[in-house]
């Protein structure tokens, strides 16, 4: 039981803290509601869990042998964060009934995790802590537990966005939120470049 609690605590601490995926969930919840956010939540959770599993099953060792591949992933992450920031900053802030079908797709959520340095660090650190001995059963157990906690954590951010969205019925306020989120995403990308 102690192992499960340790795994759950690690998963919660790394999933609930602010990061690019959670910022997009917050914005999506505020702009499009929880139902439209479900695609992003599911995609990000599936994408992260797949990354976690592959890291646990040996992907990290392969990437250590091919540092250019890892560098490519890092630069891809920077480019994707800047692209998402640009999309948010360029949005006009108008909330229209048709906008309910908008928001990030399932693929956007999954791709964002694969290009998210926080996701890579959490995967490597988590597998290092809980499955360093190569126990495949433990890799799968950790991934299953993490899936549930990751989904709930991202859903909390989208839910907070829905709550915040009640105060954003004016396009100027939506533009303010979008541009704030765009700055935070661009800041994350800049941190990756300089860090």
Image: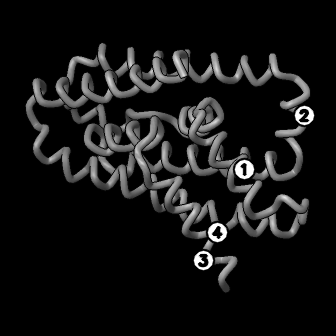
Q: Read off the residue under disc 3.
A: 5
Whether 169 is drawn above or below 66: the answer is below
The reply to whether discs 1 and 2 touch (Cβ–Cβ < 8 Å) is no
Query: Dividing the picture into quarters, in which one does residue 168 lie?
Result: top left
Query: Can you give x and y, in whole percent of width and height, for residue 7 in the image?
Result: 64, 68
Q: How many marks?
A: 4
Residue located at (69% from left, 77% from top): 3
Dot 2: what SS? helix
| 72 relative to 38 in the view: left or right | right
Q: Read off the residue under disc 4.
A: 7
Q: Read off the residue under disc 1.
A: 52
The disc, 3 or 1, on the residue closer to the chain's N-terminal end is: 3
Instruction: Compute the Cα span from label 1 to label 4.
Output: 13 Å
The disc, 2 or 3, on the residue closer to the chain's N-terminal end is: 3
Dot 3: what SS? helix
Whether 35 is drawn above or below 121: the answer is below
Name the front one of labels 3 and 1. 3
Specify the quadrant that holds the C terminus.
Answer: top right
Residue located at (33% from left, 23% from top): 182
Most foreground residue, 192 or 181: 192
Tell me the crowding category of disc 1: few under 14, some 14 to 19, or many 20 or more residues within 10 angstroms, Cα based. many
The reply to whether discs 3 and 4 touch (Cβ–Cβ < 8 Å) is yes
Instruction: Compute the Cα span from label 1 to label 2.
Output: 14 Å
Q: Read off the residue under disc 2.
A: 62
Query: Dividing the picture into quarters, in which one does residue 18 lie?
Result: top left
Specify the quadrant that holds the N terminus.
Answer: bottom right
Query: Dividing the picture into quarters, in which one does residue 192 lie?
Result: top right
Name the front one of labels 1 and 2. 2
Instruction: Compute the Cα span from label 3 to label 1.
Output: 18 Å
Name the front one of labels 1 and 4. 4
Dot 1: what SS? helix
């Amino acid at each position: 039981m102690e192992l499960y609690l340790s795994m759950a605590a690690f998963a919660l601490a790394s999933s609930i803290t602010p990061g690019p995926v959670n910022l997009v969930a917050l914005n999506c919840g505020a702009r499009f509601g929880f139902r439209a956010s479900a695609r992003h939540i599911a995609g990000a959770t599936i994408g992260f869990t797949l990354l976690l599993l592959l890291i646990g099953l040996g992907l990290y060792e392969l990437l250590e042998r091919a540092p250019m591949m890892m560098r490519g992933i890092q630069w891809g992450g920077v480019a994707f964060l800047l692209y998402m920031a640009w999309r948010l900053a360029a949005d006009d802030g108008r909330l229209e009934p048709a906008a309910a079908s908008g928001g990030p797709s399932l693929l956007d959520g999954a791709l964002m995790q694969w290009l998210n340095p926080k996701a890579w660090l959490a995967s490597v650190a988590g597998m290092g802590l809980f499955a360093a001995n190569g126990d495949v059963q433990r890799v799968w157990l950790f991934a299953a537990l993490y899936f549930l906690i990751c989904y709930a954590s991202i859903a909390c951010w989208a839910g907070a966005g829905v709550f915040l969205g009640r105060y954003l019925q004016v396009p100027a306020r939506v533009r303010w939120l979008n541009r704030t989120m765009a700055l935070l995403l661009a800041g994350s990308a800049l941190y990756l470049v300089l860090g």
